[in-house]
Image (cartoon, rainbow, N blue to C red):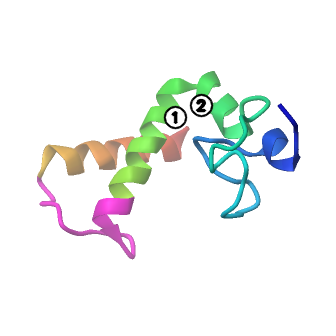
Amino acid sequence: MSKDVHTEHCCYRHGCKYGKDDCSVETGDKQQSHPCEQCCEEAADPIRSALQAFVDDFEGDHVSDGEIVDEPRWSPLTSLYKRAKKALEDS
């Protein structure tokens, strides 16, 4: 496997560190040489990583300008989101 700047710094899962659409790792043309920094952080603290992923996904789907939208405020998912976000802020 030939190495390039992308195989050394980018991640198939987390994307191109440089924001390039033609990243050899992100397109699947080459394999990354080692886990990226974010992969290493996730491996070190999988519970925090899972909470962060949930918060990010929820915010992407249900939060606009800091306000919850498209989800009833009383739903269990909304309650879990608020608790997860608070736990991440407190840690």
User: Where is mark 2, residue-wise?
Assistant: 42
Residue contact at pointers 1 and 2, CB within 8 angstroms: yes
33 is higher (above) or lower (below) than 60: above
Q: Residue sitting at 45 percent across and 43 percent down?
A: 53
Q: Position of residue 6 (x, y in %)?
A: 80, 48
Q: Position of residue 34 (x, y in %)?
A: 77, 29
Tell whether position 89 is magenta: no
29 to the left or right of 8? left
The stretch of residues the image draws in magenta is 60-74
Tell whether position 72 is magenta: yes
Quadrant (top left, top right, bottom left, bottom right) of the C terminus:
top right
Amino acid at the residue labelled 2: Glu
Q: Is 83 in front, or is 48?
A: 48
Mark 2 falls on what kind of element?
A: helix
Q: Is 83 in front, or is 8?
A: 8
Q: Residue sitting at 62 percent across and 41 percent down?
A: 12
6 to the left or right of 47? right
Q: Residue sitting at 38 percent across and 43 percent down?
A: 54
Q: Quadrant of residue 4?
A: top right
61 is higher (above) or lower (below) than 24: below
16 to the left or right of 81? right
Quadrant (top left, top right, bottom left, bottom right) of the N terminus:
top right
Q: Position of residue 90 (x, y in %)?
A: 51, 42
Q: Is 80 in front, or is 2?
A: 2
70 is higher (above) or lower (below) than 33: below
User: Where is mark 1, residue-wise?
Assistant: 49
Assess disc 2: are there few (<14), some (14-19) or many (≥20) residues with their C-alpha within 10 Å of its C-alpha: some
Q: Residue sitting at 63 percent across and 43 percent down?
A: 28
Amino acid at the residue labelled 1: Ser
34 to the left or right of 29? right
